[in-house]
Image (tube, rainbow, N blue to C red):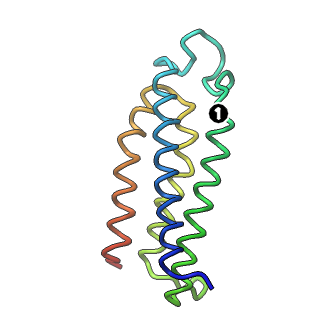
Amino acid sequence: MISYTVYKLVHYLGIFATVALLGAALGRGAANASADGTPSGGGSSVGARDPWRRRFNVLHGIGLFVILLGGFGMLARLGITQGLGLPGWIWAKLAIWTVFVGLIVVARRTASAAARALIVLPLLAALAGYIAFTKPF
């Protein structure tokens, strides 16, 4: 049986990897996109010519899976998983991480959207951490 501590480490590994990956993808998108969303050399979309796009998408999915695996493993060790009757703070964290799912799409948009997402990314991560530590609802 896997301990609570191991699940917590897996959860943190997923969080750190996903935030770092999103930062890299958004930074690359902000650097490679012009104001109108086209690559600096012209073309139809940023992601169409970016060889890292597929890698970012795959690693993003793996990171989010690892976050869920660790998070729900911790909940199981605490005995909190009883169907849809989860506490509000868990639903809030799931909503925040759902936004993280969409941030990889923003990396392929305009440079200004990617730059704004780079500001939102650490704020959302901090909010998720705050909710996890304080469990306000």
Viewed as shown, does residue 1 lie left or right of 16? Answer: right
Residue behind mark 1: 53
What residue do we see at 46% from left, 40% from top?
A: 23
Q: How far across and how far down the image is residue 70, in percent?
A: 55, 70
Q: Residue furthest top?
A: 41
What residue do we see at 39% from left, 54% from top?
A: 124
Vertical relation: 65 (above or below) 116: below
What residue do we see at 59% from left, 62% from top?
A: 66
Q: How far across and how far down the image is residue 8, in percent?
A: 48, 72
Q: How far across and how far down the image is residue 43, in percent?
A: 65, 13
Quadrant location, the C terminus:
bottom left
Vertical relation: 22 (above or below) 136: above
Label 1 crowd (10 A; few <14 / some 14-19 / many >=20): some
Quadrant location, the N terminus:
bottom right
Q: How far across and how far down the image is residue 32, in percent?
A: 52, 21
Which of the two residues, 18 or 3, is positioned nearer the viewer here? Answer: 3
Vertical relation: 1 (above or below) 104: below
Name the amino acid type tagged 1.
Arg
Number of callouts in the render?
1
Vertical relation: 15 (above or below) 35: below
User: Quadrant of the rendered structure where residue 51 is?
Assistant: top right
Dot 1: element: helix
